[in-house]
Image (cartoon, grey):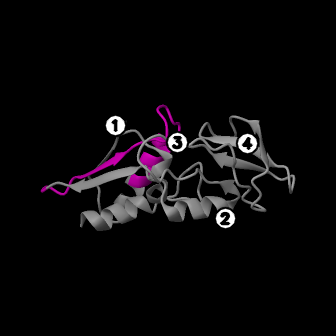
Amino acid sequence: MEAELRALAGSVPDPELPVLTLGELGVLRSVHVSGTGHVDVELTPTYTGCPAIEAMSADIEQVLREHGRHDVTVRTVLSPAWSTDDISAEGRRKLAEFGIAPPRPHTADGPVPLSLTVRCPHCGSTDTELLSRFSSTACKALRRCVACQEPFDHFKEL
């Protein structure tokens, strides 16, 4: 039952990046059902103070109620903190397909290697430049590809 409810909650689109689901974004931490049928959902925002967390919570409550679960609590949990490593491979693929350069995956233990290159999601060039440290949301930066001259968002590594 919990796996089915987790899949439902995880299928909710992110309000700021509707190309991704909350499951793909990695903000859905857990779904538990008590013996009385109460559903407790835990979400971790991409950053403390994220304004989308209220919309995420309301959307999860709505989808679970539409599937017969009326006793639902969605709680925000801040620990462990969300990281761009929590974005699934499918989520990264969808970001690139949508024209947003996905964050580079952290594949090894220890410090994240410093890399100044960001691949253009339009043409694949790594010859890109930073236009603004912030874009449409605080978790994205605005970049431009020098090769194809197209601007694009880059989901910053956290």
Would residue 154 be found to the left or right of residue 50 on screen? Answer: right
Q: Which residue is mark 2?
A: 97
Give the Cα separation between the discs numbered 3 and 4.
20 Å
Amino acid beneath label 1: Ser
- Which disc, if any, is residue 53? none
Say which quarter of the image contains residue 19. bottom right
Question: Percent from the top left, x then y, of residue 64?
Answer: 35, 59
Question: Percent from the top left, x then y, of residue 74?
Answer: 34, 46
Examine the structure image and report whether residue 49 is included in the region drawn in magenta: yes
Q: Which residue is mark 1?
A: 79
- Which disc, if any, is residue 52? 3
Say which quarter of the image contains residue 20. bottom right
Asked whether the viewer can see residue 136, the reply is: no
Amino acid beneath label 4: Leu
Precedes in sequence: disc 1 or disc 3:
3
- Which of the two discs, 1 and 3, sits closer to the camera? 1
Say which quarter of the image contains residue 7. bottom left
Tags 1 and 4 in contact by the CB under 8 Å rule? no
Question: Percent from the top left, x then y, of residue 45?
Answer: 45, 41
- Which of the two discs, 3 and 4, sits closer to the camera? 4
Q: Nearer the viewer, residue 136 or 75?
A: 136
Give the Cα separation between the discs numbered 2 and 1.
31 Å
Q: Nearer the viewer, residue 85 or 4?
A: 85
Q: Which residue is mark 4?
A: 142
Tags 4 and 2 in contact by the CB under 8 Å rule? no
Amino acid beneath label 2: Glu
